[in-house]
Amino acid sequence: MAFPTAAGYGNLSQGNFSPVIYSKKAQLKFRKINVAQAVTNTEYTGEISNMGDTVNIIVEPTVVVSSYVRGQSIDVQDLDDTQKQLVVDQGNYYGFAIDDVERRHAHHNWEALASDEAAYRLRDAFDSNIFTFMKDNVASARTLGSTSTPLKVNFDGSYTLGTEVTPTLTLATLARYLDEQNVPMENRWAVVDPFFVELLRNDDSKLINDDYTEKGALNNGMVTTRPIHGFKLYVSNNLPSTGTGPSATSGTNYGYIFAGHTSAVCTAEHIKTAEKIRATRTFADIIRGLHIFGRSLLRTESLCAAIYNNAT
């Protein structure tokens, strides 16, 4: 765009002397933090290689203990060799083309920019898939609230005892669910959305106040370096929600938060293909990649959730 001129000024009127400059620095997008890998068991990743692979995971048998008196005949238990399965049945891909002319004349490395974006999009799709899987598989007995009656969470000065709960009480109840199932304290986690974090801050909780915790806790999605009710607390924008999400007060708007142990859900992923091929109908390179993965709920007792919205 030429620099503007005053009315009636006619010298070099077309403005062709004004150069158009293209920056060599591209504007990168803001990106969501991915946390699914941090809260799931990934130890089976090395055992898959293809779409459709199945990993059979043997479950420790339950041994019955019975009372005994002298001279009693005892019963010998038959052990049950049950197993659970991790099936690699999910996949996402990307594909884009870089024309030879564009490659030669462009002032940016479009292949590198697009490949970096594609890798992020695959991670983001994986992250969303895992949390949707948790929503679909968490036991109702270990879920606070429901889709018909979301839990009312708030603490902004209008907190009403008996009809609303604070965010810290919500996490405390989820911790109790795990305690009742003998879930180990080590490696417990909770993943919440930004609105829930806001409620925690409105609670003026020292648990997430920078004056009382280590600085820089937001790296890799962690809200604070100090556990809250035994949970490592993460924030994510990939949690399932309905309507306008949990910040609204209507019962048709709500969101999910999850808490559990890293042994609850296992995930295994594998980049099956990442390749560059020549296009057959034009002069261009096609860059494409395929990401395959599986997920399985191994310990139902180690996963819990809350379906909630704003109380006020």
Image: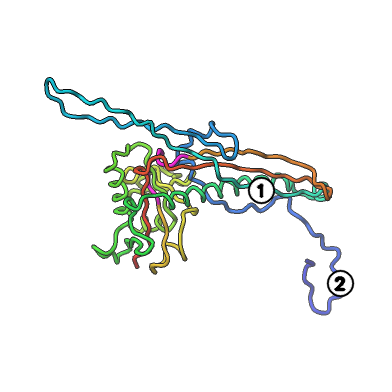
Front-most of residues 299 and 150:
299
Residue 306, image x, y percentages: 36, 55
Residue 63, image x, y percentages: 28, 30
Question: Which amino acid does the dot numbered 1 rest on?
Answer: Tyr
Question: Which amino acid does the dot numbered 2 rest on?
Answer: Ser
Residue occupying image coordinates x 57% and y 51%: 31
Residue 86, image x, y percentages: 49, 38
Label placed on residue 43: none
Q: Secondary structure at mark 1?
A: strand
Front-most of residues 83 and 196:
83
Residue on which disc 2 sits: 13
Residue 114, image x, y percentages: 69, 48
- Magenta region: 258-266
Total labels drawn: 2
Q: Quadrant of residue 249?
A: bottom left
Marks 1 and 2: CB-CB under 8 Å? no
Residue 181 appears left or right of 41:
left
Residue on which disc 1 sits: 94
Residue occupying image coordinates x 37% and y 44%: 300
254 is higher (above) or lower (below) than 54 = below
Front-most of residues 195 and 4:
195
Q: Let me know if residue 113 is in the magenta part.
A: no
Q: Quadrant of the C terminus?
A: bottom left
Mark 1–mark 2 Cα distance, whole angstroms, equals: 48 Å
Front-most of residues 157 and 214:
157
Q: Let me know if residue 263 is in the magenta part.
A: yes
Q: Quadrant of the N terminus?
A: bottom right
| Mark closest to the chain's N terminus, 1 or 2 | 2
Rendered image coloring scheme: rainbow
Q: Quadrant of residue 247?
A: bottom left
